[in-house]
């Protein structure tokens, strides 16, 4: 669950066979007490502060130029227009024409929802 560089979780409580952890996102989740864990913070904390140094290195890392392609009006609702035009509608849509602005992007009935005690954006489950 907590595997990216420089992150760590905080143990809030241990109640029998259940352990409550506060994740880096702020979410509080219950875990089985028999699960294995490593104590401490993951290494490479300073990964975000690396200096690329020159434009050529950025190009060598394949992140120096945009990789997207222009959309065709027949293949996507946002497609078309002259050059860098906007979406041209009040709400962005998916390729299937459904509104995407303000919609939740997660599966509502996920099997692990029962282990979430408090979501990261306030409120409870």
Image (tube, helix red, strand yellow):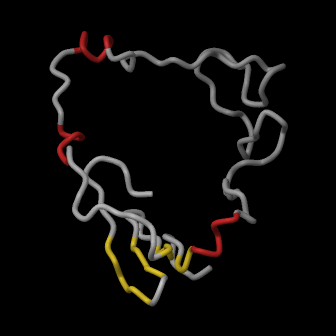
Q: Is residue 101 above or below residue 115?
A: above
Question: Residue 97's x, y, as percent?
Answer: 84, 39
Which image quadrant for residue 89?
top right
Question: With 98 as the anchor, is 92 left or right in this view?
Answer: left
Q: Is residue 5 above or below residue 106?
A: above
Q: Looking at the image, which residue is at 72% across and 58% down?
A: 107
Q: Is residue 81 above or below residue 93?
A: above
Residue 97 or 113: which is nearer the viewer? Answer: 113
Q: Looking at the image, which residue is at 45% across and 72% down?
A: 34
Q: Looking at the image, which residue is at 73% across and 45% down?
A: 90
Question: Residue 26's x, y, as percent?
Answer: 41, 70
Question: Residue 54's x, y, as percent?
Answer: 18, 16
Residue 52 or 69: which is nearer the viewer? Answer: 52
Residue 18 or 62: which is nearer the viewer? Answer: 18
Question: With 10 as the anchor, is 20 left or right in this view?
Answer: right
Residue 112 or 57: which is nearer the viewer? Answer: 112
Looking at the rendering, in which quadrant would you find the N terminus? bottom left
Which image quadrant for residue 22?
bottom left
Looking at the rendering, in which quadrant would you find the C terminus? bottom right
Question: Residue 104's x, y, as percent?
Answer: 68, 58
């Amino acid at each position: 669950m907590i595997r990216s560089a420089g992150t760590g979780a905080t143990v809030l409580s241990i109640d029998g066979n259940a352990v409550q952890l506060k994740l880096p996102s702020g979410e509080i989740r219950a875990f089985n007490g028999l699960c294995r864990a490593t104590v401490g913070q993951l290494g490479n904390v300073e990964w975000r502060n690396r200096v690329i140094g020159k434009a050529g290195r950025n190009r060598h890392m394949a992140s120096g130029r945009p990789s997207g392609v222009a959309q065709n009006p027949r293949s996507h609702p946002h497609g078309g227009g002259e050059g860098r035009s906007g979406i041209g509608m009040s709400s962005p849509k998916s390729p299937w024409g459904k509104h995407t602005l303000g919609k939740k992007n997660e599966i509502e009935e996920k099997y692990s929802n029962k282990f979430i005690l408090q979501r990261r954006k306030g409120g409870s489950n």
